Amino acid sequence: MLQSLENPGALFQYSQDEFRNQLQLKADRRAEDADQRAAEANALAAAAPGLNMQEKAESLKQKRELTSIREALVREAAPSISETKIPGVRAGIVPTPGADNAKAKYDYDPVKVQKALVKRPRLVFRGKRTL
């Protein structure tokens, strides 16, 4: 700064150096932020296959349980079922005994339901049936 009295260009050079230094600091900060974002993205990408494998393992476990449950239900519903049909039931090819009757058990007639819900009392006003 004292040189600015002797050399007027020194003040200009000092301000230019400060400006350049500030630009370099901002560029370094941006580069560090970009590196941090890249590291976070890499960590997330590395963790994603682990989560995906965990979901696949859970799905496979559920499928295995489903086949054993199907087999148990068939053996309970029809104890006389042949051993050759059991693998078909486990695979879901052969329907479980009683599965086709499930809809018939809960089948309903919408007209009957509507009539049951819309019973109105007959009111008589001045000798005329209304409502």
Image (spheres, grey):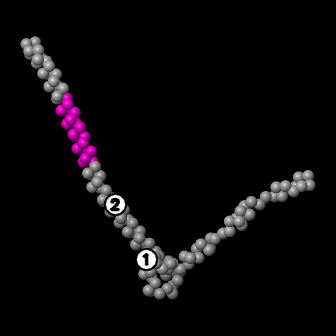
Give the position of the C terminus as an image quadrant.
Answer: bottom right
Residue density around tag 1, few if under 14, some if 14–19, many if 20 or more, within 10 Å? some
Residue pictured at 36% horizontal, 62% vertical: 55
In-image side of 66 versus 131 (left or right): left
Residue lying at the far right of the rendered structure: 127
Say if 66 sits above or below 131 in the image. below
Residue density around tag 2, few if under 14, some if 14–19, many if 20 or more, within 10 Å? few
Q: Quadrant of residue 99?
A: bottom right
Looking at the rendered structure, the kind of residue marked 1 is: Ala
Residues 72 and 53: in front is 53
Spot occupied by residue 120 in the image (x, y as percentages of width and height): 79, 58
Spot occupied by residue 16 in the image (x, y as percentages of width and height): 15, 24
Say if 15 sits above or below 53 in the image. above
Give the position of the N terminus as an image quadrant.
Answer: top left
Say if 44 sits above or below 82 in the image. above
In-image side of 119 versus 91 (left or right): right
Say if 32 sits above or below 69 in the image. above
Is residue 31 in view from this perspective?
Answer: yes
Is residue 43 rendered magenta in the image? no
In-image side of 128 versus 119 (left or right): right
Q: Main structural element of the magenta stretch: helix, strand or loop?
A: helix
Q: Quadrant of residue 18?
A: top left
Magenta highlight range: 22-40
Is residue 38 rendered magenta in the image? yes
Q: Which residue was labeled with disc 1? A: 91
User: Which secondary structure, mark 1?
Assistant: helix
Residue pictured at 52% horizontal, 83% vertical: 78
Numbered circle sitting on residue 52 = 2
Looking at the rendered structure, the kind of residue marked 2 is: Asn
